[in-house]
Image (cartoon, rainbow, N blue to C red):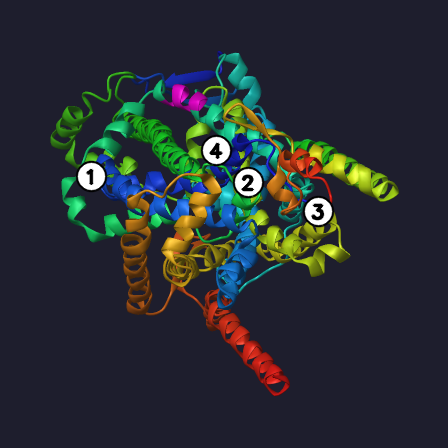
Amino acid sequence: ISHVLVCNVTQRVSFWFVVTDPSKNHTLPAVEVQSAIRMNRNRINSAFFLNDQTLEFLKIPSTLAPPSDPSVPIWIIIFGVIFCIVIVAVMLLILSGIRQRRRMSKGPTEVDDSEDKCENTITIENGIPCDPLDTKGGHINDAFLTEDERLTPL
Amino acid sequence: MEKARPLWANPLQFVFACISYAVGLGNVWRFPYLCQMYGGGDFLVPYVIMLIVEGMPLLYLELAVGQRMRQGSIGAWRTISPYLGGVGLASVVVSFFLSTYYNIINAWAFWYLFHSFQDPLPWSVCPLNGNRTGYNEECETASSTQYFWYRKTLNIAPSIQDSGGVQWEQALCLILAWLVVYLCILRGTESTGKVVYFTALLPYCVLVIYLVRGLTLHGATNGLAYMFTPKLEQLANPKAWINAATQIFFSLGLGFGSLIAFASYNQPSTNCQKHAIIVSLVNSSTSIFASIVTFSIYGFKATFNYESCLNKVILLLTNSFDLEDGFLTASNLEQVKGYLASAFPSRYSEVLPQMKNCSLESELATAVQGTGLSFIVYTEAIKNMAASQLWSVLYFFMLLMLGIGSMLGNTAAILTPLTDSKLISSHLPKEAISGLVCLVNCAIGLVFTTEAGNYWFDIFNDYAATLPLLLIVLVEIIAVCYVFGLRRFESDLKAMTGRTLNWYWKAMWAGVSPLLIISLFVFYLSDYILTGTLQYQAWDASQGQLVTKDYPLYALAVIGLLVAASTMCIPLVALGTFIVRCLKRGDTAPMA
């Protein structure tokens, strides 16, 4: 502190300073002081409990800390996770579809009917279950079967 | 016995599928812009009128046609009249173009979603320049969110001619987006029916959360007041009415064939009139709801920018005049500026060019639409919120749900005619057809991941669907009313659903809606012809903003091809059917 002289004190906390060399009794050139400050910015900041935003040295631009760059970008990790999940799900669906088709080709007729009934789940309209008769395209109407049986063949 | 047509497990799935398809990105990023441009609260007047007069009748028509014909768009229109199979084909072509370029938005949403898991958010800070003394130049002149969008995401070229190479990061995201879409459509209505529960409902959850957050943000009321102050003179502006009609038209997704495809999987007795009204009302109320959220976010962003601008001016003045810290505040700024100008005129005039004029109005007036709104403006607002990672994840997840919901409809429009055709479905199983369609679309979509890809995206976005759709829907309405016969259609509907057709629908279908569409069509045509050369916005890295450039000749040729490819289907197929029939009549005549 004995070798640092303070002058031109202003209202805001700002000041000019020069650093003297005790052995040679002259002030050190500005360039040397600037490079010294640039190298030891951190120590000077922490001495005052300040940081680059609160303690400014005019004409010495602070070197900014680069944002942290992990070796593997985070987004690739998340991408990889979701990609694998989607591929697994697609495989599962395709395989189950193939298995279903193999089961269908083994027992065509009865399995077909039950498959139809499974696909067209019974919808309830006005509280009455409707059989999807119209999807079978104009075939025998179950409601009239008993009538046919009552008629005796000639 | 032929295999029964797959059906929706319950009518709710059908309604959700339609809602999920209709409520898309346009509700979030186009409607708020239109509201702002055409008079705020007053824009709702033409919007609601167009909804009742144009939106609901056309939506009901498409659903009724699909439910009655029980086939995809090509089969349905061929049943109405053999010469009109071209209408269905045109719908499929337009849907194909749409699905090619639409999924790139989902890829971008994935990209931003994956980048939201970092602290700080990558678009909130600028990267450093070479010798680490300051920030990257392009980032300084533009803003960090614009830099992240134009440089890190798109790596955009200065013009459409410099195509550059495929960006592998974007390509990966695009492949993932197509895999997700494939996963959802793989099993047809069975899988789609379950996915639409999520894609329809989740965006609403996020919107509600955002509404609560948005309304409690500082400065949100500024945005809402700005949006809802009526500017009555806009009601007389014909552009407001035209834009309202166009927004309703495209927002509901008419003419693509998706609604016909969805309705064809219905039970014939489904009450599609009720569903049409529900879907159109939900779609419009979502638009209004989303614009409330958007404007509260706008207000927050504008207030934040305005206050930081003021703070910069205060700091500048405090530094140059060595004033006491805390002496200058926002309230006494003008007074002190006047005092300083009179007391220290020379030094004040030195400082004056560096002082920016801060205005809340100009911050609010930056009306943005489209990708700019979602990926630049919203991200800028999000980065200033507390817990920004959470809000960012929520927002991009919502965008994804909206985008995938619309993609399901687009792909259904392409796949339903393909799976209906006996020729193709007898050789290939459903999964393989879906896989092929996704693969082809993905391969073509890689064009949009090149450096000039965003310019091609803009071409597709602006020209692939607008004119052809108007023509398609016009031909659809005329076909149903006059070729098939309105009375015949009415009796078919009555036999199918058991309800008589209200006179209102008949009046709209026969008269009002076709006239509206013709006037829209004429307006667009004359607009294109009058503007002369078409231009686009290119990003200038040195200036840090968008500049207008002319399209080169081959881009204009592509635009012409896009429009022609779909519209020419209608007359060509009609002509082809006519020729085939003449030949057949010529063949059978000598035998008779």
Mark 3 — residue?
A: B3
Q: Is residue B259 left or right of residue B367?
A: right
Q: Which residue is mark 1?
A: B349
Q: Position of residue A11 (x, y in %)?
A: 29, 16
Q: Write down the residue under mark 2.
A: B266
Front-lying residue, B144 or B207 = B207
Check the image and report above or below for B324 versus B314.
Answer: above
What's the CA distance linking mark 3 and mark 2?
16 Å
Co-location on one chain, circles 2 and 4: no
The span picked out in magenta is B208-214
Label annotation for residue A61: 4
Q: Are marks 3 and 2 on the same chain?
A: yes
User: Three-letter amino acid code at disc 3?
Assistant: Lys
* Chain for numbered disc 1: B
- The quarter of the picture where residue B179 lies is top right
Asked if residue B325 is positioned above or below residue B435 in the image, the reply reads above
In the rendered view, tell whether residue B99 sits above or below residue A130: below
Sequence-wise first label, 3 or 2: 3
**Amino acid type at mark 1:** Ser
How many C-alpha atoms fall within 10 Å of the one at disc 2: few (<14), some, or many (≥20)? many
For residue B503, side relative to residue B130 (left or right): left
Residue type pointed to by label 4: Pro
Q: Residue at x 31, y 55 (%)?
A: B510
**Is disc 4 placed on a helix, strand or loop?**
loop
The answer to which of B488 and B313 lies nearer the viewer is B488
